[in-house]
Amino acid sequence: MKRFLLAIVVIAVLSMGAGQDWVEYKLAELEQRIEVLENKTQPTTQDEGTFSGYGSGNTMPFTVANSPWAIEWKTVSSMPRRPIFGIHVYDMDSKYIGGYGGQVSENVTYGSSVSYIPAGTYYLKIDSDYYIHWVIWIK
């Protein structure tokens, strides 16, 4: 059903003569909204795990039991630009704890770091352009 709705949106937008960048942006935005709605039935926290998405936003909270813990990421860019990709760690009181990231290549970029942030419950704030698909692993 969601693919059908996305197809209708694409056809409508293309018929209005909108540019390809704008169409890709709107499609990524719709996919994020659908993902958020689908995730509303999931638990509010998870133990470590995997997060993925497009562009900027926050992950759902997660709990790490040990310190140090690893944070790894992969980004995929379909545009010939080299934007910055940032991962920011916040505690449950929305206090900034630390950050990671770097410049994204035109194709696939990998990164990883060991975090000496204490064990606890956190969420990630992702800063990225809308056309960057990212995957983050907390281990």
Image (spheres, helix red, strand yellow):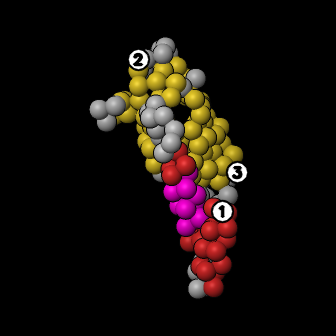
- Pointers 3 and 1 in contact (CB under 8 A)? no
Q: Distance between the residues labelled 3 and 2?
A: 33 Å
Q: How crowded is mark 2: few (under 14 residues within 10 Å), some or many (20 or more)?
A: few
Lower sequence index among marks 1 and 2: 1
What is the x, y in percent for residue 17? 61, 85
Amino acid at dot 2: Pro
What is the x, y in percent for residue 23? 60, 71
Foreground mark, 3 or 1, reads 1
Element under disc 3: loop
Lower sequence index among marks 3 and 2: 3
Amino acid at dot 3: Asn
Q: Mark 3 points at which residue?
A: 107
Residue nearest the observer in this picture, 136 or 27: 27
Q: Majority secondary structure of the magenta segment?
A: helix
Position above or below: 70 against 127:
above
Q: Identify the residue at horizontal 29%, vertical 32% (top origin).
A: 93
Element under disc 2: loop
Residue nearest the observer in this picture, 81 or 24: 24
Span shown in magenta: 26-35
The answer to whether one can see residue 28 in this image is yes
The answer to whether one can see residue 104 in this image is no
Q: How crowded is mark 1: few (under 14 residues within 10 Å), some or many (20 or more)?
A: few
Label ID, residue 118: 2
Q: Name the residue under label 1.
A: 1
Position above or below: 105 against 78:
above
Q: Does the magenta stretch include residue 28?
A: yes
What is the x, y in percent for residue 22? 56, 72
